Amino acid sequence: MLRKAMMIKLNPEKTEEYKRLHATAWPSILRQITASNIRNYSIFLREPDNLLVGIFEYHGTEYDADMKAMADDPDTQRWWALTDPCQAPLESAAPGEWWAPLEEVFHHD
C-alpha cells in the first residue's frame, strides 16, 4: 500500500462551488476512485490560504495504469471539467503539474 498526498490552490471565488460539488460527488466518480484502487481518500481545505490537500491510500499494483484508467474515464473527465476551474497549481509546481505531490516525512500507525 502506498500513501499519497498532494496540494493545489483553490480559487477563493470558487470555494462554495467546490465544497458543493464534493458534498454531492457523483456515484460514478466514487466508483472510479474505488476501481482505481484508491482508498481512504480525503481532501482538506486550509482557509484563508485557500490550499487543498488530498490524501489517499493506493492499494493496487499498477499505479500508473490505474491513474491512466481514471484519467481516461469519460465521467471523470466531465467531473474534472467542473472542478479544474476551481483550482490553480502552486507557484512551485513543475511545468504541466496540476496537483503537486507532497513528500511524506513522518507516519505513525
Image (cartoon, helix red, strand yellow):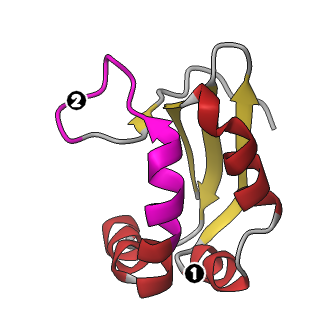
Q: Secondary structure at mark 2?
A: loop
Q: Quadrant of the N terminus?
A: bottom right
| Residue type beneath disc 1 | Gln
Q: Is residue 26 left or right of residue 104?
A: right
Q: Position of residue 54 (x, y in %)?
A: 62, 42
| Numbered range of the magenta stretch | 79-96
Q: Is residue 106 left or right of residue 67?
A: right
Residue ID at (54%, 28%):
104
10 Å crowding of disc 1: few (<14), some (14-19), many (20+):
some
Q: Position of residue 79 (x, y in %)?
A: 53, 69
Q: Position of residue 17 (x, y in %)?
A: 69, 49
Q: Is residue 52 visible?
A: no
Q: Is residue 2 visible?
A: yes
Q: Which residue is mark 2?
A: 94
Labelled disc at residue 32: 1
For this orientation, the residue located farthest to the front is 13
Nearer-the-camera pick, 106 or 5:
5
Q: Position of residue 109 (x, y in %)?
A: 81, 38
Q: Secondary structure at mark 1?
A: helix
| Residue type beneath disc 2 | Ala
